[in-house]
């Protein structure tokens, strides 16, 4: 007789994989979907939302991929989108976004335990479906004027949100910023994350279930670092203890256990759904956005900024936990004398043996297998996810080509240039920021976000552009 638990999970996994496979097939053949515009996506979302019951509609938000090429949509959906959304989840179930069309996905906030106000706060910085308007001394956010008035109004009313629809690439970038990431997880302090996953440090230490490793020469930090593994109610919890000064008690080789002091730490704590939450924190309870540059750096960064920033640790880590070359297990033995060159009483010796010579590497390898199993249920692997995440994140952050800029307006580059040339010729005086769009130069993303309302207004009102 088959094991009912195994049968359930096999069916659950196969259901997720079938949904992902079907969507990838749709996206791979969806070249005809190119040329979509923000307005067309609003209309598609509106049509979909009308079919939902009011309670579901209230939780539903839409993410559009219209500006990605068909190949990018297929690759990123297969290896990134579902994992990224579930990385922000407080729930135990892995939920894949629902395909609405080859370019549009629907998600329900309560599937991931998100507060609606947290999601709603994204409107403050969103540049593609919103504009800022000044009313007296106040600046307010409004739906962009190039969007269909009826459809965006009704979509906003049905969802109860000023941000019913966002671009997927912008959403990934926005939720990869530390403060927004922490807000989605609902944590303001490191202890909030500990409570979420059920981490009891005192109980773990008392039962000698904590494990440690020391990396003498790190490729991330400037000095030696201490790695710790704990077991929470949800799964493993790893944290590094790092210093800017390797002397004195800041040396994890010469000062063991609590005799070692540190100033910052990097945390990987397993969420209820089997994926890892990330955090950077001080030696106390404070969350920080980035590791101080005199402590650690990210050699994998594709921008001049080499800071280690949460939650982008996955790009540097290859989507999983790195297996360290441990100083103690490599150079010493864990026998009665331990070989540390210091005299320890019986209790201290037991503590040091269990902490520094226990099965740290075996547990870490098993934890990576657990993570890979969760990734597999979402249709990818840690390495494939890490590559896709890096490609998508830096693809948004780095300067974009004029072809990519045109695609964000749903146009070919030729049509965009023709419409902008017509505007410049007739306007007499125009914003110098338009120049790179016409000249085919790369465009800095921050400037593009700022220019988007002006360019959209020109293109969607020009006979040579496209009607929204």
Image (spheres, helix red, strand yellow):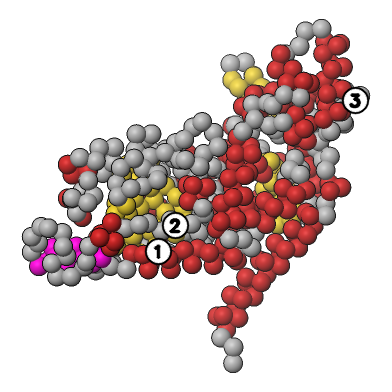
Q: Name the residue under label 1.
A: 364
State how far apart marks 3 and 1 are (Cα).
Answer: 59 Å
Q: Dot 1: within a 10 Å radius of its alpha carbon, few (fewer than 14), some, or many (20 or more) residues? A: some
State how far apart marks 3 and 2 are (Cα).
Answer: 52 Å
Q: Which label is found at residue 237?
A: none
The residue under the point 87% across, 17% down is 422
Q: Name the residue under label 3.
A: 464
The residue under the point 22% across, 66% down is 333
Which residue lies most toward the top here?
428
The quarter of the displayed image where residue 9 is located: bottom right
Which quadrant: the N terminus? bottom right
Q: Nearer the viewer, mark 3 or mark 2?
A: 2
Q: Does residue 447 appear to the left or right of 467 in the view shown?
A: left
Q: Nearer the viewer, residue 84 or 413?
A: 413
Cβ–Cβ under 8 Å for marks 2 and 1: yes
Of the residues under marks 3 and 2, which one precedes in the sequence? 2
Q: Give the range drawn in magenta.
A: 346-357
Please tell me whether mark 2 sits on a helix, a strand or a loop: loop
Count of marks overlaid on the render: 3
């Amino acid at each position: 007789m088959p094991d009912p638990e195994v049968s359930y999970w096999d069916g659950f996994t196969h259901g997720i994989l079938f949904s992902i496979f079907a969507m990838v097939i749709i996206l791979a053949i969806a070249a005809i979907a190119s040329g979509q515009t923000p307005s067309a996506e609003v209309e598609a979302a509106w049509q979909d939302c009308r079919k939902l019951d009011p309670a579901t509609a209230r939780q539903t938000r839409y993410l559009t991929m219209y500006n990605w090429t068909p190949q990018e949509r297929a690759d990123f959906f297969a290896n990134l989108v579902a994992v990224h959304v579930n990385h922000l989840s407080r729930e135990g179930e892995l939920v894949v976004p629902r395909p609405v069309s080859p370019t549009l996905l629907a998600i329900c906030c309560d599937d991931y335990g998100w507060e609606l106000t947290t999601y709603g706060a994204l409107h403050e910085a969103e540049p593609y479906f919103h504009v800022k308007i000044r009313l007296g001394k106040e600046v307010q956010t409004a739906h962009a004027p190039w969007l269909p008035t009826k459809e965006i109004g009704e979509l906003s009313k049905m969802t109860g949100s000023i941000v019913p629809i966002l671009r997927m690439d912008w959403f990934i970038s926005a939720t990869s910023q530390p403060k927004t990431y922490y807000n989605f997880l609902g944590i303001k302090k490191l202890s909030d994350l500990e409570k979420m996953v059920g981490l009891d440090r005192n109980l773990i230490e008392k039962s000698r279930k904590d494990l440690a490793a020391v990396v003498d020469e790190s490729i991330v930090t400037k000095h030696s670092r201490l790695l710790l593994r704990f077991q929470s109610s949800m799964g493993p919890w790893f944290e590094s203890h790092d210093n800017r000064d390797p002397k004195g008690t800041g040396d994890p080789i010469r000062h063991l256990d609590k005799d070692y002091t540190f100033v910052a730490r990097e945390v990987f704590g397993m969420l209820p759904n089997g994926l890892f939450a990330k955090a950077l924190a001080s030696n106390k309870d404070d969350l920080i956005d980035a590791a101080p540059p005199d402590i650690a750096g990210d050699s994998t960064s594709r921008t001049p900024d080499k800071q280690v920033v949460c939650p982008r640790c996955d790009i540097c880590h290859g989507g999983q936990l790195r297996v360290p070359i441990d100083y103690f297990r490599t150079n010493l033995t864990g026998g009665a004398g331990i070989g540390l060159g210091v005299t320890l009483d019986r209790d201290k010796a037991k503590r040091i043996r269990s902490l520094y010579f226990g099965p740290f590497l075996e547990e870490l390898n098993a934890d990576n297998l657990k993570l890979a199993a969760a990734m597999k249920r979402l249709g990818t692997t840690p390495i494939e996810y890490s590559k896709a995440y890096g490609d998508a994140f830096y693809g948004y952050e780095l300067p974009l080509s004029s072809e990519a800029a045109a695609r964000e307006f749903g146009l070919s580059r030729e049509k965009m240039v023709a419409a902008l040339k017509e505007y410049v010729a007739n306007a007499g005086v125009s914003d110098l920021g338009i120049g790179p769009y016409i000249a085919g130069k790369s465009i800095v993303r921050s400037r593009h976000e700022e220019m988007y309302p002006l360019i959209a207004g020109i293109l969607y009102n020009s006979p040579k552009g496209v009607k929204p």
